[in-house]
Structure formats: C-alpha cells, structure tokens
Image (cartoon, coloured by chain):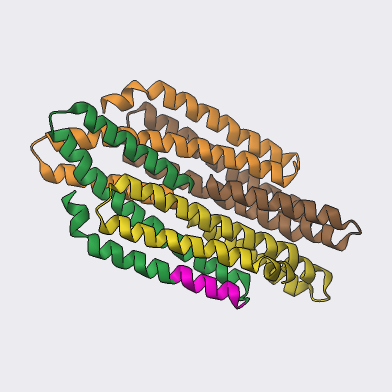
Chain colours: A orange, B brown, C yellow, D green
Amino acid sequence: MRGYTMDKDDYVKRLRRIEGQVRGVQRMVDEDTYCIDVLTQISAINRALQSVAVGLLDQHVRHCVRDAALGDDPERADDMVNEATRAIERLVKA
Amino acid sequence: MRGYTMDKDDYVKRLRRIEGQVRGVQRMVDEDTYCIDVLTQISAINRALQSVAVGLLDQHVRHCVRDAALGDDPERADDMVNEATRAIERLVKA
Amino acid sequence: MRGYTMDKDDYVKRLRRIEGQVRGVQRMVDEDTYCIDVLTQISAINRALQSVAVGLLDQHVRHCVRDAALGDDPERADDMVNEATRAIERLVKA
Amino acid sequence: MRGYTMDKDDYVKRLRRIEGQVRGVQRMVDEDTYCIDVLTQISAINRALQSVAVGLLDQHVRHCVRDAALGDDPERADDMVNEATRAIERLVKA
C-alpha cells in the first residue's frame, strides 16, 4: 500500500481536524446552541469523513486491487474486489 | 428547547465516544492498518453521527416547530419548518 | 394535507420524469453502455427521488404535524413526529 | 465487460421492477396516500437503485480496472480508477 503510506500525513491531518470538529459539536450541544446550527456542523463532519473514506477506497483500488491483479493469485484479486464492494455498500448506506 | 436540554448529557456522551472513534481512526491510519478496516470504522462513525443528527432533528420538530405552531407568529413556524427541511436536505446528501 | 394536494401535479410530473429516467437506464444496460455512464444516471435518479422525498417530508411537518399540534390530541402530534423521524432515518440510510 | 453482459438480464429485470415501483409512487401521490407511506416506498426504491449501482461498480472494478491493470497502458488503468472514484463519490452523495 505505497499510495496509502504516501498520503498518510495528509489523512492524519484531516482526521485531526475532524476530531476538533466533533469536539466543537460537543461544545455546541453543551452550550445549548440552536440545534439547526449543530446539524449543519454534523453534516460538514459527515462530508469530511466521506471524503477521507472515498480517498482510502481510491487507493485500495489503485494499489491493492491492481497489485493483486498483476500478482499470480487470481483469487486474492477477487477477494480484494469483494472487500471493496462491501466497503462501498457500507459507505453508501452510512 | 426543553427536550434538547433534557437529553443533553446523552448527546455529549455519544459525541465524546465519536471523538474517541475518530482518534482511533487516526491511529489506524498512522499504523498502516488495512484500509478496508479503516473504512469499516469510518462507516460506523458516520452512522453514529447520523443517529445524533436524526435525534436532534426529532427534537427540533417535536419542540421548536410545535411551540412555534402553538405561538401567535405563523411566520416563525414556517421559518422553523424551512430550516428543518434544509437541514434534512444537507443530512441526506452528506 | 392541503399543501400536498396543491403540489400533487408537480410531484406526479417529477415522478413521471423519474420513471422515464429509469427506463433510460434499462436501455443503457441493454445496449452495453459503459457502466460509469450508467452509474452517473443512477445517481441523478437517486437525487431526484431524494428531492421528491424531502418535499413530501416538508409538507408532512408543515401541515400534518402542525395541524396535530394545534388539535386537541397531543398524542396524535407525537405520533406524527415519530413517523417523520423514522422516515428521515430511512431516507438518510437509503 | 464480460461480467456486465453476463448479468445484463438480471439488471434489466431489477430496473423494470424499479420502474414499476416508481409508477406505484405516482399512483400513491395521485390517490393522496398518506405521505409517510409514500416516503417508505421512495426509500425502498433508492435502496434498490443503490444496490444496482454497487453491483455495476463491482463489475467495473472486477473487470475493467483489472483488464486495464493487466494491459500495457498504465494510464488507462489510472483513468478507470479515477472514473470509479468519482462514481463512488456521486453515489455516496446522491
């Protein structure tokens, strides 16, 4: 998973920002912020998380699935596509 | 927003757990965890956040919209429904 | 449900367009259209359906929930909010 | 895209069922069915469409991306992953 490792710092940075946003929502709830404003913030967090997830999926297909396709174990490549598909399914329904 | 305040502790507790989950994902990425497992965890966080959001929306409609409907300012009630609808739209697309 | 009835023709028209889009996707699959193009079209249909759903939800809250809130049966208003919340939950996860 | 063609009949059949469901929703709206019941039906249609989309994506990755990876044009394989990623993005947000 070269690609994944390459962008690791970027992902960790984005996730740290998301962590801060979640903490912000805690504060909003604690301070009785108008709930519509809390909802706007939660939607922003969800979008940020989905964007991280789509990036990870991209790298899974770009590297893992491709490496497996070029390898000599066709079943392994099939397993990787199966996993990717189930991950997409969970994301779409999350 | 009585209802909202009533469940405040519950929401803060759930958001704190979500914050911990986001921190867990940072660690997973940092330790090069297989990306499909990271995705599974992100989907779980998204579901937990959506569930908080749906709860807040429920209370908005149950209390804010209803109080406004019973009040003497029909425009205010309309505004609250408009805000709720836009929030639902953002949630559905997040 | 006055509002609902008022916009009935608009909803039926939009749903007829969606029906045509679904038929279009059948044709695309039947003619072996590149699957990414099929997916783009399916996403467009999903967005159109979600938009109809958000419109119906808006009217449910605007009219049913409000009428119930103004009525003399507080439990009925509660039931309507419960139904709306469950519908939002299903939409968000659909 | 062998796989795609193989399951073609199955996809067309599922899309025909979805077309019928959309027509059913038109009828529901036309007959002033309680809007929560209409929403339940729309959520079912969205789920059915998403399931078709995930199936098509699976086949895109399983066949197109893999064939491209095994081919002698690495850029083509990259293009296919890019397209898949953008399609996933649209699905997740639809």
Q: Is residue D66 visible?
A: yes
Where residue C87 sits: x, y (%)?
58, 63
Vertical relation: C73 (above or below) D46: below
Judging depth in this view, the residue of C45 and C54 nearest the camera is: C45
Q: Identify the image quadrant of the N terminus of chain C.
A: bottom right
Vertical relation: D23 (above or below) B64: below
Judging depth in this view, the residue of C54 and D16 nearest the camera is: D16
Q: Which residues are magenta?
A: D21-31
Judging depth in this view, the residue of B6 and A63 nearest the camera is: A63
Q: Is residue B1 visible?
A: no
Magenta highlight on residue D72: no
Q: Residue at x 38, y 43 (%)?
A: D88
Q: Could you tell whether A21 is left or right of A3 in the image?
A: right
Magenta highlight on residue D29: yes
Q: Residue at x 49, y 44 (%)?
A: B45
Where residue D55 sits: x, y (%)?
30, 54
Where residue D45 sits: x, y (%)?
45, 64
- Tell me the chief SS of the magenta region: helix
Vertical relation: B45 (above or below) D75: below
Residue found farthest to the bottom: D31
Hey, which quadrant is residue C88 in on the image?
Answer: bottom right
Q: Residue at x 32, y 59 (%)?
A: C27
Q: Could you tell whether C90 is left or right of B13 in the image?
A: left
Q: Could you tell whether B4 is left or right of C85 in the image?
A: right
Q: Could you tell whether A90 is left or right of A16 in the image?
A: left
Residue found farthest to the left: A72
Q: Residue at x 41, y 38 (%)?
A: A53
